[in-house]
Image (spheres, helix red, strand yellow):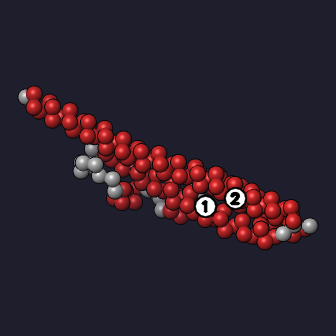
Amino acid sequence: MQLQGAAQEKVQQDLAHHLEMVQAVVNRLAGNSFAIRGWSVTLTAALLSLAAKDSNTAFAVVAFYPALAFMGLDAYYLRQERRYRALYDAIRRGVVTKAYEMDPAGFDSDVPSWLVVSTSRTVLGTHLPILAAIVAVLFYALRA
């Protein structure tokens, strides 16, 4: 009887450790997304300051490429984060019973596609103002 209690405790400890591992991945993905947003703002601001200073539209046009690339990467990391959150929830509910399973591939149907995530409020709320600033500086540089 005591052996059964010890085995149950071991299962609970394994479950807690498994959830901690998945949460660590979610935290890393969220950190990556935050860093990408910072890089996007920094690089775009630098290119736009050059475009406005010299009234050179080439810098504003070039700023579109990294801004769109960072937007795509941000959407990618947000989607990955959502997939791991779905995995976390499945582990918590007992749906995933394989010990230390870390592959979120089975949860693709539970999470919107990359394209849908890239048009979410989270992604557009950060990157749409950046793209709008690029367009504004481009018009400013063309008028000067």
The amino acid type, in three-letter code, at marker 2 is Leu
Q: Secondary structure at mark 2?
A: helix
Looking at the image, which residue is at 64% across and 51% down? 38
Which residue carries the number 1 mark? 70
Looking at the image, which residue is at 36% across and 60% down? 105
- Where in the figure is residue 88, as x and y percent of width and height? 37, 46
Looking at the image, which residue is at 28% across and 40% down? 15
Say which mark, if any, is on residue 43: 2
Task: Give the spatial CA distance, label 1 vs label 2.
Answer: 10 Å
The foreground one among 110 and 27 is 27
Relative side of 10 to 121, left or right: left
CB within 8 Å, label 1 to label 2: yes
Label 1, residues with CA under 10 Å away: few <14, some 14-19, many ≥20? many
Q: Is residue 25 visible?
A: yes
- Where in the figure is residue 73, as x and y percent of width and height? 55, 61
Q: Secondary structure at mark 1?
A: helix
Label 2, residues with CA under 10 Å away: few <14, some 14-19, many ≥20? some
